[in-house]
């Protein structure tokens, strides 16, 4: 008995950085493996909900420039997250709502007009081989599918178990922050910094650096002065850790962050606040406030 043919999604235009992401692989830090997963988790979950997928189904995450893909079977898809122009074979279709893509048609998510990261969900999800329970790409460790290139083919899951798109008003997609405000819990190494530096962290205006990526949101602004010299032994790092490298500019660790590090962590941003960081374009004003 032959197995049914696997449907595939072909990459026509990969974009600057497009990866497969799901809910990530938490729980492996003791082996040096980070969590990965969609940076804007609420946007990925909403895109999945709109095509009838489970919330942790694998989607495509784009970065600034979008992407274009072609399924070899009809599929219901949603493009959400960062705002962009969406077309099917060049014809405009709805952003942030389910659209039907015929077999062989090209679904294109254009460059972001607001925000940074877009999410493309497909009924049935994307089903590349999981690694440690997740299909997410981890840019730091190299686990999971590689970032997309033109000509790649990704297996599509069976949409038979997908529910119908939810009825009602358009989905409440979150907006892009004009100013990013990140609450921060002090510690564990805030005592490595001067009192003036701690005041600066909570009062100064920073900006999102163009050197930010899935590993960390880098900042531009005043440096934080240490009260202690020397280096720490490497210690565990958590999602949202605000690490301060030798240049003194805080770095907020995101999903592909290393699991250990030797620079002091002045504070930790709660996970719930990090989705907005995923959509903050370079140059966005950033303030840290006490959580």
Image: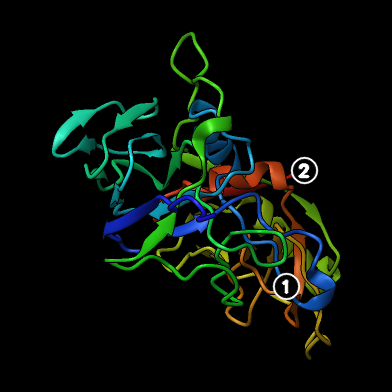
Residue at horizontal 59 percent and vertical 44 percent from the top: 57
Q: Which sits earlier in the primary sequence, circle 2 or circle 1? A: 1
Using the rendered image of the protein, determine whether residue 46 is visible from the camera's viewpoint.
no
How would you rate the neighbour count of disc 2 (Cα within 10 Å): few for under 14, some for 14-19, many for 20 or more? few
Residue 33 circle label: 1
Horizontal arrangement in the rendering, residue 73 relative to residue 54 (left or right): left
Horizontal arrangement in the rendering, residue 34 relative to residue 70 (left or right): right
Q: How many marks?
A: 2
How would you rate the neighbour count of disc 1 (Cα within 10 Å): few for under 14, some for 14-19, many for 20 or more? many
Q: Do tag 2 and tag 1 residues touch (Cβ < 8 Å)?
A: no
Percent coordinates x, y for residue 84 in the rendering: 29, 38
> Is the N terminus in the top left, top right, bottom left or bottom right quadrant?
bottom right
Query: Does dot 1 land on a helix, a strand or a loop?
Result: loop
Residue 262, compared with residue 87, is above or below; it is below
Residue at horizontal 32 percent and vertical 47 percent from the top: 71
Percent coordinates x, y for residue 144 in the rendering: 57, 68
Residue 291 circle label: 2
Residue 138, compared with residue 67, is above or below; it is below
Percent coordinates x, y for residue 227 in the rendering: 79, 78
Query: Does dot 2 land on a helix, a strand or a loop?
Result: loop
- Most extreme residue toward the bottom is 230
Residue at horizontal 40 percent and vertical 64 percent from the top: 210
- 259 or 123, which lies in front? 123
* Quarter residue 40 falls in: top right
């Amino acid at each position: 008995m032959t197995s049914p043919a696997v449907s595939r999604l072909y990459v026509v235009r990969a974009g600057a950085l497009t990866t497969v992401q799901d809910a990530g692989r938490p729980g492996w830090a003791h082996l040096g493996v980070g969590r990965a997963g969609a940076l804007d988790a609420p946007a990925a979950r909403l895109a999945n909900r709109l095509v009838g997928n489970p919330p942790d189904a694998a989607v495509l995450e784009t970065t600034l420039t979008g992407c274009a893909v072609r399924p070899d079977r009809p599929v219901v898809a949603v493009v959400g997250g960062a705002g962009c122009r969406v077309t099917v074979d060049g014809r405009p279709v709805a952003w942030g709502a389910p659209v039907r893509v015929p077999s062989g048609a090209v679904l294109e998510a254009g460059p972001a007009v607001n925000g940074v990261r877009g999410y493309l969900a497909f009924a049935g999800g994307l089903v590349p081989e999981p690694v440690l329970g997740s299909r997410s790409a981890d840019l730091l460790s190299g686990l999971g599918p590689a970032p997309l290139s033109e000509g790649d083919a990704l297996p599509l899951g069976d949409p038979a178990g997908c529910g119908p798109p939810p009825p009602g008003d358009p989905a409440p997609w979150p907006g892009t922050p004009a100013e990013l405000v990140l609450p921060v819990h002090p510690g564990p190494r805030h005592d490595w910094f001067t009192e003036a530096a701690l005041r600066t962290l909570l009062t100064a205006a920073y900006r999102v650096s163009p050197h930010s990526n899935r590993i960390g949101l880098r900042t531009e602004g005043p440096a934080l002065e240490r009260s202690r010299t020397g280096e720490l032994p490497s210690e565990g790092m958590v999602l949202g850790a605000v690490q301060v490298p030798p240049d003194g500019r805080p770095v907020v660790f995101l999903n592909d962050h290393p699991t250990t590090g030797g620079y002091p962590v002045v504070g930790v941003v709660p996970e719930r606040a990090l989705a907005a960081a995923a959509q903050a374009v370079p140059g966005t004003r950033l303030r840290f406030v006490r959580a």
